[in-house]
Amino acid sequence: MLAVRLLHVLGMALVLGGATLTWWLFRQDAASDSAAVRTAVAYERGFWAAIGVLVMTGVGNLGSLAPYVPTVETRWGTVFAAKLLLVLTVLALSLVRTLVVHRYRRAEATEGSGQETDTLRVAYGATALSLATVVALAEVLAHG
């Protein structure tokens, strides 16, 4: 069980740290746009792989608690429901972010457009902030 939890924490570290790094690169001057785009493309691959690990290990962690999971009427159950809702929102918006990254990469290769860097900067900032909130909710669930 410790290995499953370790994988869960490492997966979250990758998605949160990667989003923060990519956001920071998009905040730099225009000279770093191609580096930011390359990082974003790599991040998207790692993000979806890590999300797969997070879902599998999260279900495994929940399965070990299944008989003892409180209902939504309790504080713990409410926080847990909020965490799951936020995770689903992050996943839905991340699909859009991934599509924007690949669209931007194609546009950059053909016409060198720099218009979408603001969109990507905001998207990665929002991803990092949302994932940090998920981590905070997870801490509340683990430690009250």
Image (spheres, grey):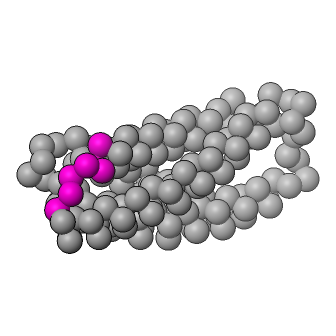
The kind of secondary structure the magenta stretch mainly shows is loop
The answer to whether residue 114 is magenta is yes
How many numbered marks does the figure carry? Answer: 0
Where residue 110 appears, as percent x and y from the top left, is 20, 71
- Picture layout, residue 41 above or below residue 91: below
Q: Does residue 22 appear in the picture of this structure?
A: yes
Which residue is most to the left?
31
Where residue 87 appears, as percent x and y from the top left, is 63, 48
| For residue 86, side relative to residue 65 (left or right) | left
Q: Which residues are magenta?
A: 112-118
Q: Quadrant of residue 83?
A: top right
For the N terminus, the quadrant is bottom right
Residue at image point 58% right, 68% down: 52
Q: Does residue 21 appear in the picture of this structure?
A: no
Where residue 89 appears, as percent x and y from the top left, is 62, 47
Where residue 78 appears, as percent x and y from the top left, is 79, 33
| For residue 55, side relative to residue 63 (left or right) | left
Residue at image point 34% right, 49% down: 120
Residue at image point 25% right, 49% down: 115
Residue at image point 54% right, 51% down: 93
For the C terminus, the quadrant is top right
- Picture layout, residue 118 above or below residue 88: above
- Picture layout, residue 118 above or below residue 105: above
Q: Nearer the viewer, residue 69 or 128?
A: 128
The answer to whether residue 139 is magenta is no
